[in-house]
Amino acid sequence: EENFAFYFVNGTAPEHKRYGVTPKGRGYRWNEFDPRFDLAQHGNEVNRFGWVVEIDPYDPQATPVKRTALGRFAHEGAQLSLTADGRVVLYSADDARFEYIYKFVSRDRYDARNRAANRELLDHGILFVAHFKDDGSGEWRELTYGKGALTPARGFRDQADVLIRTRSAADAVGATPMDR
């Protein structure tokens, strides 16, 4: 669900605000029925939302898998491609005004003859965010802890923190906001 921020109230922390959670909420009133939607009581609950969850249509008994390496934001679509050397590339946009476009490149290569070998392709790799220049060209900026602005001095604790706070990480590296 890309509109997960709307379900919560009392979002006063900067990260809550960055994801669109407001102090009064958006009218759903879920917090009146389940306290986990009140961030004053459960401040980290919102961090459980905003992830891609993969369901294997060929194995209905398989447990759905959260793909944290793809980052946490309001994912709008997930388009896959393969690089020339066989690695998986996944493109996704953040479905909110003035947010970003992301690209994930897997560490390992796709093997068309071995489904089992492909199950973890989206767990290991590098997440990038788009930066566009005035001349229309652009570049992909890496969202890896310890590189560029993604350091303790800028408030990032580790790679998990970068992925939980993907929008803030993208802000820090100078991603280009998209006016959807």
Image (spheres, grey):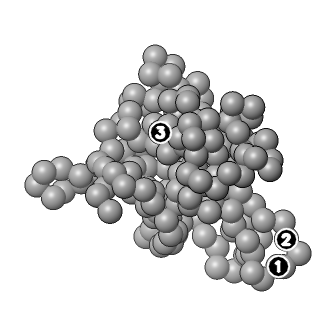
Q: Position of residue 141 (x, y in %)?
A: 36, 45
Foreground of the two, 129 or 22: 22
In this figure, which residue is indicated by the disc labeled 3? 18
The image quarter in which residue 95 lies = bottom left
Disc 2, SS:
loop
Contact (Cβ within 8 Å) of mark 2 with mark 1? yes
Residue situated furthest left in the rendering: 135
* Residue pointed to by mark 1: 59
User: Which residue is nearer to you in this view: 34 or 140?
Assistant: 34
Disc 3 crowd, CA 10 A, few/some/many (<14, 14-19, 20+)? some
Give the alpha-carbon distance from disc 3 to disc 1, as whole Å.
37 Å
Query: Outermost residue, right direction?
Result: 61
Q: CA distance from mark 3 to mark 2?
A: 34 Å
Question: Disc 1 residue type?
Answer: Asp
Q: Measuring 56% from the left and 58% from the top, which residue is drawn there?
A: 3
The residue lying at 60 percent from left, 29 percent from top is 158
* Residue at 89% from the left image edge and 75% from the top image edge: 61
Q: Quadrant of residue 64?
A: bottom right
Mark 2 highlights which residue?
A: 62
- What amino acid type should be assigned to the residue bearing mark 2? Ala
Circle 1: element type: loop
Q: Residue at x 38, y 38 (%)?
A: 171
In whole angstroms, how far apart are the C-alphas of marks 2 and 1? 5 Å
Q: Residues within 10 Å of mark 2 (few under 14, many from 20)?
A: few
